[in-house]
Image (cartoon, grey):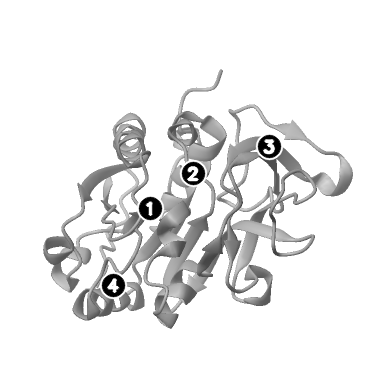
């Protein structure tokens, strides 16, 4: 069973897992540090950071965490037994947050692709573009008060100038009816988009007993200093841990309002 203690005052525990068996992102240390600082500042959660799959990706170990963050995991980073433990954890109600290259790992495993939401295919060279928040009322993307964002009047959408790798996926996330799309790239603002006029980049879902969130952005160190980006990661951690009904809204900013 995943950790189910839901005290509004006691921090819950999360695992930040960043093992790589392929390309390794230079931003992993910055991201791990940012997540630890986030837990310390808000007091909402404590972080165990690891790349030791043998020690951490087991049912007894995973059961101690309310959610797990797979940070830039690439290649075949889990063996069959470890993947089975992850599956058992999710089926017991565990949470999952996948960041950026987590979609590129375990590409031959159908269940893992469904957990993430889609398998990574390829990306064009990094460049600046626009990310549109599709559902600004969802718990993960709701703006309860802090960080600067541009507002588009049409359809009450919000948008953000962003420099990153604009991921393309092997299957179109919109075709997965279980996914609740939260944000998409505007392919008219960057080159190399291979999914037509609709380019989903962040989503969440209730999946196989647990909750899952995926964010396709996050290649560079700068993402983990950005309030808009880190607010979504913070809220995704809380949502996948099923603490969204008890957490004080004032704590749901990655850094103090400016």
Q: Residue at x 41, y 59 (%)?
A: 102
Q: Position of residue 125 (x, y in %)?
A: 59, 46
Residue highlighted by disc 4: 86
Name the element at disc 4: helix
Residue 119 vs 143, above or below: the answer is below
- Asked whether the residues under the numbered discs 1 and 3 touch, taking CB atoms below 8 Å apart as contact, a structural biologist would say no
Q: Position of residue 188 (x, y in %)?
A: 80, 48
Residue highlighted by disc 3: 160
Mark 4 / mark 3, whichever is N-terminal: 4
Q: CA distance from mark 1 to mark 3?
A: 22 Å
- Asked whether the residues under the numbered discs 3 and 2 touch, taking CB atoms below 8 Å apart as contact, a structural biologist would say no
Q: CA distance from mark 3 to mark 2?
A: 14 Å
Mark 1 / mark 4, whichever is N-terminal: 1
- In-front residue for pair 198/257: 198
Q: Residue furthest left?
A: 55
Q: Is residue 50 left or right of residue 124?
A: left
Q: CA distance from mark 4 to mark 3?
A: 33 Å
Residue highlighted by disc 1: 72
């Amino acid at each position: 069973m995943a950790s189910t203690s839901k005290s509004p005052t006691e921090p819950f525990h999360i695992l930040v897992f960043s093992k790589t068996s392929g390309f390794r992102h230079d931003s992993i240390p910055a991201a791990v540090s940012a997540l630890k600082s986030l837990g310390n500042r808000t007091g909402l959660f404590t972080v165990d950071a690891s790349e030791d799959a043998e020690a951490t990706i087991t049912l007894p170990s995973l059961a101690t965490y309310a959610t797990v963050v797979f940070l830039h995991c690439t290649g075949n980073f889990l063996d069959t037994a470890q993947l089975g433990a992850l599956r058992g954890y999710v089926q017991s109600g565990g949470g999952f947050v996948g960041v950026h290259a987590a979609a590129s790992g375990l590409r031959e495993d159908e269940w893992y692709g469904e957990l993430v939401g889609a398998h990574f295919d390829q990306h064009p060279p990094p460049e600046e573009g626009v990310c549109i928040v599709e559902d600004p009322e969802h718990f993960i993307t709701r703006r309860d008060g802090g960080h600067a964002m541009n507002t588009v009047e049409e359809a009450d959408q919000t948008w953000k100038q962003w420099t990153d790798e604009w991921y393309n996926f092997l299957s179109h996330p919109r075709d997965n009816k279980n996914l609740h799309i939260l944000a998409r790239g505007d392919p008219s603002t960057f080159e190399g988009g291979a999914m037509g006029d609709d380019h989903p980049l962040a989503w969440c879902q209730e999946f196989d007993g647990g909750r899952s969130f995926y964010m396709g952005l996050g290649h560079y160190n700068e993402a983990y200093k950005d309030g808009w980006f880190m607010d979504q990661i913070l809220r995704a951690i809380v949502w996948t841990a099923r603490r969204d009904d008890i957490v004080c809204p004032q704590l749901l900013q990655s850094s103090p309002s400016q």
